[in-house]
Amino acid sequence: MNLIKYIALELKAKKEGSLYSIRNKKKSKDLLLLLNYLFFEYTRKDLDLITKNLAVIDEEQDDEIILHGHSRSLFLDLTDQKIIYISLLTDYLDFEDSLNLDSTNLMFVDQLKKKKFDHFKIDRNNFLNILESWHKIIEKQPHSLILSQDKNNLVTFQLFENQEAAELYEKQYCPTKN
């Protein structure tokens, strides 16, 4: 297992939109966008909505797609619909406001690709798996969890019943350098 970044956290309240405390994070500023999306934007009823929206998007071609979310939103790359970006809606609105008549062909996702705005990039199938995992996390109510990304960009959760088990996993598998 070759993890490149992770966030270790302890769940403080045991429900959707609940509190958490970050115990440790390594090279994971972008993973925080995913984590904040899950905690503060997403509810379990949204999975069906997202899945249906993706089916519609697969059939149609639009200029740009905002798939879901309020302050942290999902953006779909229309040139590679297997990729989803999580970014701040305020960045998107600022980008839109900055466009003039000569730059109407500029796309926000292109600006994300050029790293002009903070974002988290995730494979569409991996993202849907993360949402399904999130449902199980809410039901299982673990004490701690680690959200990690490996060198193949696969994002996963590891659940732990106590702090000691999470710390042991961190020592064994998580990168130690920032």
Image (cartoon, grey):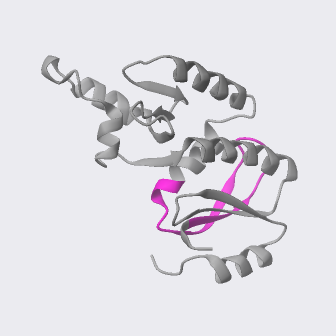
| Residue in view at x 52 percent, y 62 percent | 152
Residue 155 falls left or right of residue 63? right
Q: Nearer the viewer, residue 29 or 103?
A: 103
| Residue in view at x 47 percent, y 26 percent | 66
The answer to which image quadrant residue 141 occupies is bottom right
Residue 169 falls left or right of residue 35? right
Give, as a single range, the part of the protein colored magenta. 6-31
The answer to which image quadrant residue 159 occupies is bottom right
Instruction: Estimate the x, y position of residue 97 in percent, counting from the top left.
Output: 26, 24
- Which residue sits furthest left? 102
Asked if residue 14 shows in the view, the reply is no
Q: Above or below — where is 160 with respect to 11?
A: below
Q: Above or below — where is 162 with respect to 50?
A: below
Q: Is residue 24 magenta?
A: yes
Assign the C terminus to one quadrant of the image: bottom left
Instruction: Estimate the x, y position of residue 30 in percent, counting from the top left.
Output: 47, 54
Residue 42 falls left or right of residue 121? right
Instruction: Estimate the x, y position of residue 136 in percent, counting from the top left.
Output: 81, 48
Assign the N terminus to one quadrant of the image: bottom right
Q: How many marks?
A: 0
Q: Nearer the viewer, residue 61 or 32?
A: 61
Asked if residue 96 shows in the view, the reply is yes
Q: Above or below — where is 50 with respect to 122?
A: above
| Residue in view at x 49 percent, y 62 percent | 28
Q: Above or below — where is 8 with respect to 69?
A: below
Instruction: Estimate the x, y position of residue 142 in percent, counting from the top left.
Output: 82, 59
| Residue in view at x 33 percent, y 45 percent | 113
Q: Is residue 11 magenta?
A: yes
